[in-house]
Structure formats: structure tokens, C-alpha cells
Image (cartoon, rainbow, N blue to C red):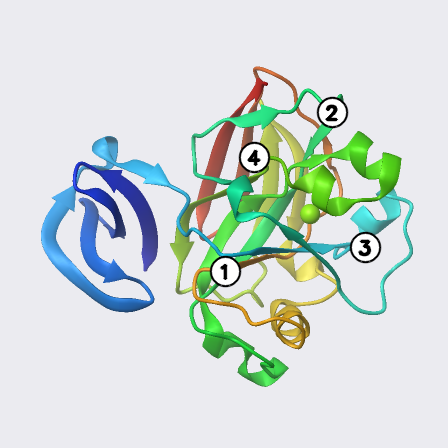
Amino acid sequence: MKIVRMQTDEGIRYGGVEPDGIRIYDGTPFVAWQPTEVLVDFGKARLLAPVFPTKVVGVGSNYAMHVEEMGRQLPDSPTVFLKPSTAVVGPGRPIVLPALSQEVHHEAELVVVIGKVARKVAVEDASSVVLGYTAGNDVTARDLQREDGQFTRAKGFDSFCPLGPAIETEYDPLEDFSLECRVNGEIRQGTSINDMIFGVAELIAFVTSVMTLLPGDVIMTGTPSGVGPIRHGDLVEVTLEGVGTLSNPVVAE
Ligand code: MG
């Protein structure tokens, strides 16, 4: 199913996408998950990021052609970093370009949403801790990243982690699904998620060998080649086949 999170007049609620609208659920996808009688029209749903993670784990250098365009070496093991939860925004919300940067880039990514407390998970058990998958944009101040190599600064600004629009729970990351990024309708990035160097199961095993992942935490699995600048007034769209399109306007601070 496709799970969304939305603002309603009664507060923030989760929902399930049905043919005629969004079914409101009690509880969360992680605990006490029960459908209600309430169905909200698609046009009236105010979507939020589909989860609010305690942490966003990023993965660098996970597509060979992106490693090449960045002038890096192919990694022997995953390169991981953290983005703060305060960077997360939902579909339709603006990406705010910070005054500190003159060169902010889009990075379209497949995002894993964790469904259970996950610690020291073996590769063969990795799928058992996954709730589903969504699309994400690992927005990056490239000039700041080049300047001092600090991923946390370059990727940690508020609004630098759009996620959504929905979590697809029936998604197999081993299938040949496409991942694309368009800016103002022009295609910038396009690949198959099968081109990842380290697959989802390996990434979950690697990350949970270090830190415990909690329900709702996410792993951004890295971006393919074609990263490039976004500017005030642009519309950035990340389309993950089988999941949907995450659209965000870009505004200057
Ligand atoms: Mg990235």
C-alpha cells in the first residue's frame, strides 16, 4: 500500500491511498495501525513528509558515474553521513537556498523507511526491518562541501531533505525501477536503482552495525550522476518509479 502523512483539522494523521481518496488511519504504520471510516479527497489532502525521522542517514558515492563526476575513488565500503531531522520537508514545500551558499545542487535518491527497531541486522534479514520506500532529494550546498568537506554543514540546512510523496510498502528494491530528477521539466538525472554500488540490504547491515535505527528513520541510498544547480523560482521533481513524484519549488532565503 501507499502510506502518506497529512495535516488535518484534527492534527497530523497517517493515511492509506485508495482509488477514491486517502483513508485516515488511527495510530501510525509502526504501532496500533487501524483504518477509520474517514476518506479524504485527494484535492483536500495537505501532505507532509511521509515520516518524521529521528535521523536521516545519507550514503555518499553509491553510483559509479556520480563517483566519477565528483572526481572520487570507488569506495570499498559505504560512505555514510547524517542529515538533521530538521532538514526534512514534505512534498510541495519550498527548498530554501541559504544565503551562505551560491551553488545548491539537487540529488535524487531512493529512500528506505525503517519500520522496526533495527540493530546489527544481517544482510539476509534486512528486508524484515523495512516499512517501505519513498523518494528523496539530498539537497547539497556544493560550494560549501567543496570548501571544507563537511557533509553535515553542506547537507544540513533546513529544507535540504524533501521526502515523499508516499511510502510504498510493496516495493522490491532489486527490481529495475527508474529514478529521475527534473528541473523545470528538463531531465537532469535518470538511472535504474539497480546501478547502486551497495544495495539496500548491504546498507542496512552496514548502518545498523554502527547505530540503532528506529521506526521512521530513513536511509538515503545515494544519488546517480547528473547533479546540478537549482535556483530561485525552479521546480524540482524527483520521480521514483512505483512510488510517485516528489515536487518542491526553490526559493531564496
Ligand atoms: Mg546524496
Identify the residue shown where x is 47% and y is 40%.
Answer: 245
Query: Which label lies toward us, 3 or 2?
Result: 2
Q: CA distance from mark 1 to mark 2?
A: 28 Å
Mark 4: amino acid = Asp
Q: Quick check: 181 above or below 251?
A: below
Task: Give residue 95's position: percent from left, percent from top.
Answer: 55, 28
Is disc 2's CB within 8 Å of ligand 1? no
Badge count: 4
Ranked by sequence position, the earlier of labels 4 and 2 is 2
Q: Quick check: 145 above or below 127?
A: above
Callout 1: helix, strand or loop? loop
Ranked by sequence position, the earlier of labels 3 and 1 is 3
Task: Give residue 101's position: percent from left, percent from top.
Answer: 74, 24
Identify the residue shown where x is 66% and y is 77%.
Answer: 209
Query: Which label lies toward us, 1 or 4?
Result: 4
Q: Nearest the camera: 237 or 6?
A: 6
Query: Which label lies toward us, 4 or 3?
Result: 4
Q: CA distance from mark 3 to mark 2?
A: 27 Å
* Residue 86 is at least partly visible in this image: yes
The residue that disc 2 covers is: 101
Position of 249 with respect to 157 (left or right) is: left
Q: CA distance from mark 3 to mark 1?
A: 26 Å
Checking the image for residue 158, the label placed there is 4
Checking the image for residue 64, the label placed there is 3
The residue that disc 1 covers is: 217
Residue contact between numbered discs 1 and 2, judged by CB atoms under 8 Å: no
Quarter of the rendering occupied by the C terminus: top right
Mark 2: amino acid = Ser
